[in-house]
Image (spheres, rainbow, N blue to C red):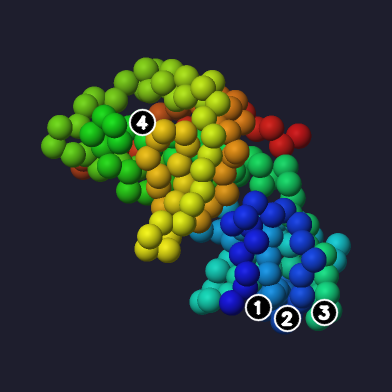
């Protein structure tokens, strides 16, 4: 099983390349002993970057392993793995923004059930509970940005059942295997772009400033 260094916030590491094979799409599937690359999952896109200066195009969980899809083959043995840090930060900001929206809408009687923290497609979906309140996007956006300005800190812990949980300041924890900002202020600002209600399911779309450049 690949050791998930990204859960500790790592963006680079000396690792061992254990396997490398050509796959039908023309990329090379690379298995490492440990990885700083966050695989796609939990609504978060995968990291990209380099292993031994070879471009990593996509990272996925397959069974018990994390597989890195690379443009060229990589020799077995020791290697240096480096994540695209600007992209990682952007994805972390998007993910943390989704958590914040989830918390605040849940307080209004809507239960979060699914989220997608992708650039240009970021959204959180909720299911309506019996006493759910009507959502006013402008008021919700103002509240989100107030929490951001409050500079709440991120806390990551493992609960009694062995699951990883993430929370910000006094807000309750969510089970999560994604990457996050250290403080909500790093999000800078949340813009709520649209809300859709269909069959008691509410979808809120959002965006944040792109600070990759």
* Element class at badge 2: strand
Q: Residue 204: x and y, percent?
A: 38, 34
Give the number of the mark in front: 2 or 1.
2
Could you tell whether 138 is left or right of 22 in the image? left
Q: Position of residue 11 (x, y in %)?
A: 72, 53
Q: Which residue is mark 3?
A: 77
Spatial distance from mark 4 to mark 1, Cα to Cα?
Answer: 44 Å
Residue 54 visible in image: no
As helix, strand or loop, the secondary structure at mark 1 comes to loop
Which residue is the site of mark 2? Answer: 18
Q: Indicate which disc, 2 or 1, sits on the residue closer to the N terminus.
A: 2
Foreground of the two, 107 or 167:
167
- The answer to the question of whether label 4 and label 2 lie on touching residues, with beta carbons closer than 8 A, is no
Circle 4 — which element? helix
**Marks 3,2: beta carbons within 8 A:** no
> What secondary structure is marked by label 3?
strand
- CB atoms of marks 3 and 1 within 8 Å: no
Residue 40 in the image: state x and y as whole percent: 56, 59
Quick check: marks 2 and 1 in contact, CB under 8 Å?
A: no
**Front: mark 3 or 1:** 3
Pointer 4 or 1: first along the chain: 1
Q: Is residue 114 above or below residue 12?
A: above
Find the distance from the CA under tag 2 to the CA under tag 1: 20 Å
Disc 3 and disc 1: Cα gap in Å? 24 Å
Q: Name the quadrant of the N terminus.
A: bottom right
Q: Is residue 132 at all visible to an observer of this figure?
A: yes
Please tell me in which quadrant of the rendered image residue 52 appears. Answer: bottom right
Query: Going from the N terminus, do you reach mark 4 or mark 2 first?
Result: 2
């Amino acid at each position: 099983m690949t050791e998930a260094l990204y859960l500790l916030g790592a963006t680079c590491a000396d690792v061992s390349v254990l396997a490398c094979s050509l796959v039908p799409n023309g990329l090379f599937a690379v298995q490492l002993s440990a990885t700083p690359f966050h695989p796609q999952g939990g609504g978060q896109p995968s990291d990209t970057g380099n292993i031994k200066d070879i471009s990593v195009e996509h990272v996925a969980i397959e069974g018990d392993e994390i597989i890195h899809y690379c443009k060229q083959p990589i020799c077995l043995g020791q290697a240096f793995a480096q994540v695209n840090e600007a992209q990682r930060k952007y994805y972390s900001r998007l993910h943390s923004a989704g958590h914040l929206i989830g918390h605040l809408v849940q307080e209004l009687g809507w239960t979060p059930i699914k989220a997608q923290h992708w650039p240009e497609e970021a959204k959180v979906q909720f299911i309506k509970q019996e006493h759910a309140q009507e959502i006013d996007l402008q008021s919700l956006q103002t509240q989100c940005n107030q929490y951001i300005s409050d500079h709440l800190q991120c806390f990551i812990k493992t609960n009694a059942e062995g699951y990883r949980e993430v929370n910000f300041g006094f807000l309750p924890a969510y089970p999560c295997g994604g990457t996050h900002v250290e403080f909500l202020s790093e999000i800078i600002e949340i813009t709520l772009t649209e809300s859709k209600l269909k069959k008691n399911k509410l979808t809120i779309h959002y965006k944040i400033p792109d600070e990759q450049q």
